[in-house]
Amino acid sequence: MSHDAPVLTQNEERAEALLVRAIGIPALTANIVNSTIGAGIFVLPALVAKGLGAAAPLAFLACAIAMVLFVTCFAVAGSRVSLTGGLYAYVEVAFGRYVGFLAGVLYGITAITAVAGVVNVLVNSIGGVVPLLGNPIIRVVVMFSVYGVLVVINVRGVRAGAGAVTAVTLAKLLPLLLFVGAGIFFIHPVNIAWSGWPGSKALGDSVLLLIFAFVGVEVGLIPSGEVKNPARTVPRAIYIALAITTVLYIMIQLVAQGTLGTDLANHPSTPLAEAAARFLGNLGRTILLAGATISAFGFVTSDILSSPRILFAFGRDGVIPAWFAHVHPRYRSPDTAIVTYAAIAFAFSVTSTFEALAVLSNVAVLLMYFLCCAACWTLIRRDVRADGPPFNFPGLKIVPALAIVAILWILAHATRREFAVTAAVLVVASVLYWLRRSAVRRS
């Protein structure tokens, strides 16, 4: 084992032991599906159709195949490391605290760019009902208001934030199910007929963008310390969740493509709402716009509740200035971290588009997946085991290698800008990390 590999302290072991292993396959599957299906699918069908035309479903299949490799690595790692923390715990056990820290930083980049992109979806969805939002100044005011309201809610306490998250869970799935259930009868076969096989670059560019809709499995795996029989539950839950998500996504794309045809690419902000208008009239358009708005608001609410805790933890550990770990004297919430996180996300929202932010987020998350797949291979090689026999099957050792190849192929379609932004953040974070380590050793 690496000399820097983490060893749980007595307090950490006691904390893990206090957790109740009560999450079974149905509950974990539902948690993963809920974490995966978000606001992105209300927008991505138009962006994928723009690159691939009627062959757009191929990008969904390519994403699903790649995700099967990724989640198999997650399942194998999850069956060998049953600590709470998901991917970050797997990476930390395999490679030590520094690489685990980098995985946490990559998660931070993923979260902040994703929420900034989804706020664009939120404003665009509202703009479908209120055309006044087409004004750039009004857009900025609405974005500021969204962040401002959520900052106030979450600074006033985690309980209020958690209540807001619970309120939007079902509301984002019902419009999508209605869209597929009604729209399947209005698909025109000529609209989904391929004119030819897409090129590798077009497919790769679309997969790099579309992976945004599939990310979320790792969020559902964070409570691994509370899963019953993780070696059995984790793999079954993630495969079932991935199958449900993929089928739903492909049906959404087919309905949108089948009803709008080539016109789908002309509605990058509200494609599903425009498709619904074709077979459900203005009521259908309103329902889908409401669904996109609720889904986007739900995602942003959940993110502002949880992700600022990364800044709080880094401040607490001395990696960044200690005032980031400030706690509100009355509400006992990490107010400085919440305000700072929201301010950075607001800046990204105002200065970029959903498409650009989605790609930037995906680069960070794919690098995090890379670390996890490499960690999976290391855990297999060391034969690290948790509770009971780990998830195993013939040819297991080749899966991490295939997953890494898939990640590298997808990342090859990113631009220098996305890599430069991610690398700059990692370099700054690494310098702060090692300065902190040196200070601790000296003291």
Image (tube, rainbow, N blue to C red):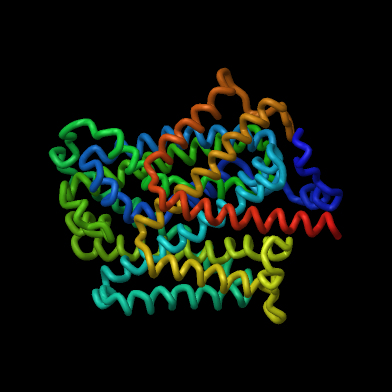
Visible in this render: residue 164? yes
Pinpoint residue 424: horizontal percent, then vertical percent: 53, 55
Residue 117 is left or right of residue 225, and the answer is: left
Instruction: Work out which quarter of the rendered image holds the C terminus and state it.
Output: bottom right
Q: Residue furthest bottom?
A: 330
Is 212 placed above or below 402 here? below
Visible in this render: residue 226? no
Residue 170 is left or right of residue 397, and the answer is: left
Pinpoint residue 342: horizontal percent, then vertical percent: 52, 70
Is 318 placed above or below 407 here? below
Q: Residue furthest left?
A: 190
The number of numbered badges drawn on the structure is 0
Q: Residue furthest top?
A: 394
For the point 51% across and 73% down, the residue is: 150
For the point 84% across and 57% down, the residue is: 442
Is 25 placed above or below 394 here? below
In front of the other: 64 or 198: 198
For the point 31% across and 43% down, the residue is: 251
Residue 387 is left or right of residue 146, and the answer is: right
In front of the other: 351 or 436: 436
Pinpoint residue 351: horizontal percent, then vertical percent: 38, 67
Residue 156 is left or right of residue 120, and the answer is: right
In front of the other: 210 or 272: 210
Pinpoint residue 41: horizontal percent, then vertical percent: 36, 52
For the point 16% across and 52% down, the residue is: 263
Instruction: Work out which quarter of the rendered image holds the N terminus and state it.
Output: top right
